[in-house]
Image: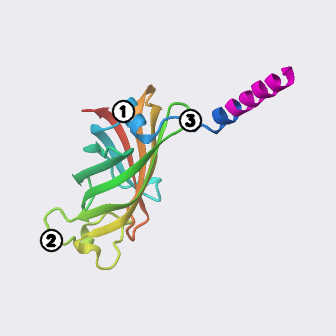
Amino acid sequence: MIKRKYTYWLGLFFGLVLISCSKDNDGMDGKELIQKYDLAGTYTAQITPAFMGTNPVASGEHTIYFDDLGDGRLRLHFEKFRVGSMPFEMNVDIVMNVKEGSGNTVLFEGSNGTFKADPPNGGEIDPDDLPDGIQLPDGAEAGLYSNKATISGAYGEIEKNGQKALHYDLKLIPGVALPIEILIYTKAKN
């Protein structure tokens, strides 16, 4: 009788251990992270198109939007970004998967986004008007388009200019025939 009780309790103990170990305890899902960090909304961002991700072509502030799609994903979009010597107005629309990172950060990845670079007046760009070192691919004078844009990055406490605050820090690869990356760093939520 004691042996049977001992076996019963031992079996129950191991069963509970197995159940608790197999329970999905990987942290929060995308929906919970979007709500916890209040990720959706309108932001002011510093947008920097850069060749090879390191040589800035131009940089400026612009309003960008993050929409909660309700399924653990965010949609990033903005229109008509143009600053300085940029020959085009940039338009971006991409959906990002949201997952938990380490140290209270949120990670993002997205693909198959839309990137458009349109001449500001609807005409064509005169190649002579481009800054030194920039050469457009053949046929790009009327603009560039891709539905293969990708994005990656994080949201978390980032130190910039001696101050720590919660920011998005993203890198968009437009998927066009130019070796350019677009760096997006949020400054403030509007």
The answer to whether residue 18 is above or below residue 181 is above
Tag 3: residue type? Answer: Ser
Q: Residue at x 41, y 30 (%)?
A: 166
Secondary structure beneath label 1: helix
Marks 2 and 3, Cα distance to the nearest angstrom? 47 Å
Q: Residue at x 39, y 71 (%)?
A: 177
Q: Residue at x 33, y 52 (%)?
A: 58
Specify the quadrant that holds the C terminus.
Answer: top left
Q: Is residue 111 magenta?
A: no
Tag 1: residue type? Answer: Gln
- Of 50 and 105, nearer the camera is 105
Secondary structure beneath label 3: loop
Given the current orientation, which residue lies at the most extreme right position?
A: 3
Q: Main secondary structure of the magenta part?
A: helix
Given the current orientation, which residue lies at the most extreme bottom position?
A: 138
- Of 43 and 23, nearer the camera is 23
Q: Which residue is mark 2?
A: 123
Marks 1 and 2, Cα distance to the nearest angstrom? 43 Å
Q: Nearer the viewer, mark 1 or mark 2?
A: 1
Q: What range is drawn magenta here?
A: 1-16
Q: Which residue is mark 1?
A: 35
Secondary structure beneath label 2: loop
Q: Nearer the viewer, mark 2 or mark 3?
A: 3
- Left or right of 91: which side holds 33? right
Marks 1 and 3, Cα distance to the nearest angstrom? 18 Å
